[in-house]
Amino acid sequence: MNDVLQSLFQLFESAPVLVAAYDGFDRLRYANKAFRSAYFIEPDETPFWPDLMRRNHCAKRGTVIRAADFEEWLISTQSRRGKVGFRAFETDLFDGRWLWMTETVREDGWMLCIATDVTDLKASTREVRQDRDLAIKASYTDELTGVANRRFVTARIEEMLQRQDTDEVSSLGCLCVLDIDHFKGINDQFGHHNGDLVLKDFARRIHRLVRRTDCFGRVGGEEFVLALPATSLEQARLIVERMLVGVRKSRPLKDRSDCKYTFSVGVAAAQPGDTPISLFARADRALYMAKLAGRDRIHIDDASFDRSGKIG
Ligand SMILES: Nc1nc2c(ncn2[C@@H]2O[C@H](COP(=O)(O)OP(=O)(O)OP(=O)(O)O)[C@@H](O)[C@H]2O)c(=O)[nH]1
């Protein structure tokens, strides 16, 4: 086996295809020579993907990013990156090359990237393919905040519910419904445009605390969901508590330091036989309880306790 691994490693190093592996935290753990050269990575470096993209973008090298605002592009891309088992797309580099990039993702979040140079391939129809990729991206993205939309998140919840390879109820995962408190009041007091900025601030803050294996998206006006596969109620509670603290500190409007906001969360643990609708209904009921109890808090669905017997 060691011989095979060694030969494989040598083949990767000499191959013209770009090969890389990222761990569940999106840290580069392996890149062959072709990959390191395309993205300007030293042999002993293991950067996080966002840092790698940011530094290459600043130096105008590596991937060409056409978005006007790099950080907004990053949030939008990260909210879908590594959340599906496999995807493939065309991308171009500052050096003029076009790559056909594939991403294969394991359940624990590790990702294998393999890219081939397709610069000379069907260049005349490239624009059509790019338009198709942009349309696919748009169909999964919430236009205002850039995070995933209802369609994308629902598909991830379905996948979470299909992973019934365990008897432990708590390890199927949890669904959280997050809703900004008194959002109508924010619109009324600060105006609709500023209300939009609050929504964007919320999406950005929550997104920072979302793990690669989780999925966060906007499903309605001021309503968001967070799917946490293979996560116990106790772990879910800890994750959401950190989000509540982060949002409490936020002052989302530059010129209005008096503008602050909170949100409430309902959490339900997935049960065997659940559908996205039944699970969402329980989390939504828990959200209602959190609102009733005074807002700016988390409420865990009572049935989730009953069935798992304990928290976690
Ligand atoms: N600025 C802005 N407002 C939106 C958007 N979508 C929905 N809204 C507003 O969000 C508000 C939601 O208000 P409600 O559902 O009454 O709830 P709330 O005021 O947040 O109160 P609680 O949820 O009970 O804490 C409504 O006034 C909507 O018009 C949007 O994209 N941008």
Image (cartoon, rainbow, N blue to C red):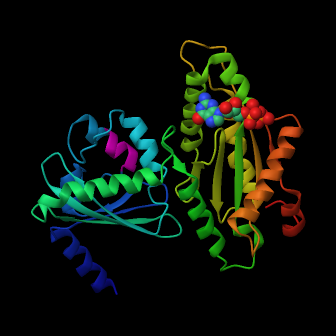
For the N terminus, the quadrant is bottom left
Please say whether residue 50 is one of the residues in the magenta stretch. Answer: yes
| Residue 156, percent from left and from top | 57, 63
Which corner quadrant of the image does residue 36 belong to? bottom left
On screen, residue 162 above or below 22: below
Describe residue 305's horizontal placement relative to residue 60 as left or right: right
Which corner quadrant of the image does residue 250 belong to? top right
Residue 33 seen in render: yes
> Mostly what secondary structure, the magenta segment?
helix
| Residue 30, percent from left and from top | 33, 62
Q: Give the magenta-colored segment's residue range.
A: 47-54
Front residue (pair 48, 113): 113
- Image label count: 0
On screen, residue 187 above or below 305: above
Describe residue 118's horizontal placement relative to residue 283 as left or right: left
For the C terminus, the quadrant is bottom right
On screen, residue 287 above or below 222: below
Describe residue 18's horizontal placement relative to residue 124 as left or right: right
User: Which quarter holds ligand 1?
Assistant: top right
Please say whether residue 150 is one of the residues in the magenta stretch. Answer: no
Q: Residue at x 54, y 33 (%)?
A: 200
| Residue 214, percent from left and from top | 58, 57
Front residue (pair 39, 2): 39
Front residue (pair 93, 47): 93
| Residue 160, percent from left and from top | 62, 68
Residue 233 seen in render: no
Q: Residue furthest left?
A: 120
Q: Residue at x 58, y 53 (%)?
A: 150
